[in-house]
Image (tube, rainbow, N blue to C red):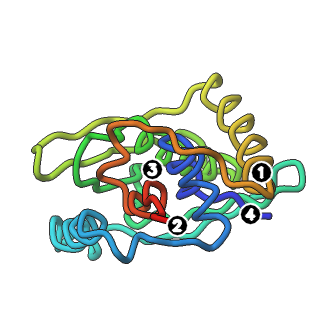
């Protein structure tokens, strides 16, 4: 069983979305918001690919394989650059980047940090990893493993964010008898 940065992000927003994604039910391809975010990522900093590296990381924690793909990593300054569309799930963005920093540490890279860039908002947030964060991530990995191993999909969360989710129709469709 693998836990990756996407699952950390999804788990922070909605356990149901995390479970659906981990169990092969992917709806992101149907979402204009997801497509818009991907386009923003590809076009916001065109020179970035020349300056920074894309790296894939993995580590093992108590029998669980942890993986992550950092799109832009400044190896000289040890800074992860993550581009996001908006701040509606900012906490999930932070945990995703903290997970990347943690993966770097598990691979022997100390002192890394992250920057989450919101080009449309013209804002940047710095992300650091604390000892408490490391404990939280290790605990989250265990919770995610348990969650995605469940036979039953978790219930909907009925949150405001659901209306923007690519799984909205799947979660809230009612069958008419």
Q: Between label 1 and label 4, give the one nearer the viewer.
A: 1
Q: Which residue is mark 1?
A: 145
Vertical placement of 159 versus 16: above or below? above
Query: Is residue 74 in view from this perspective?
Result: no
Question: Which of marks 4 and 3 precedes in the sequence?
Answer: 4
Q: Are marks 3 and 1 in contact (CB under 8 Å)?
A: no
Question: Which of marks 1 and 3 precedes in the sequence?
Answer: 3
> How far is disc 2 from disc 3 in space, using C-alphas?
15 Å
Question: Which of marks 4 and 1 precedes in the sequence?
Answer: 4
Question: Which of marks 2 and 4 precedes in the sequence?
Answer: 4
Q: Which residue is mark 3?
A: 78
Label 1: which secondary element: helix
Q: Which residue is mark 4?
A: 2
Which residue shows up at 35% across the image and 67% down it? 52
Q: Between label 3 and label 1, give the one nearer the viewer.
A: 1
Q: Which residue is mark 2?
A: 69
Residue 29 on image: x %, y %: 38, 77
């Amino acid at each position: 069983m693998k836990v990756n940065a996407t699952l950390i992000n999804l788990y922070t927003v909605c356990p149901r979305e995390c479970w659906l994604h981990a169990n092969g039910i992917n709806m992101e391809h149907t979402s204009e918001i997801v497509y818009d975010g991907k386009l923003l990522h590809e076009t916001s900093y065109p020179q970035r690919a020349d300056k920074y590296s894309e790296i894939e990381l993995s580590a093992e924690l108590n029998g669980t394989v942890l993986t992550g793909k950092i799109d832009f990593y400044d190896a000289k300054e040890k800074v992860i650059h993550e581009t996001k569309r908006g701040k509606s799930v900012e906490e999930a963005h932070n945990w995703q980047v903290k997970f990347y920093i943690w993966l770097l540490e598990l691979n022997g890279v100390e002192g890394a940090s992250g920057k989450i860039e919101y080009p449309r908002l013209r804002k940047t947030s710095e992300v650091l990893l604390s000892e408490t964060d490391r404990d939280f991530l290790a605990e989250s990995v265990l919770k995610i493993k348990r969650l995605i191993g469940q036979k039953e999909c978790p219930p909907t969360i009925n949150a405001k964010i659901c209306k923007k989710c690519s799984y909205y129709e799947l979660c809230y469709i009612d069958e008419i008898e």
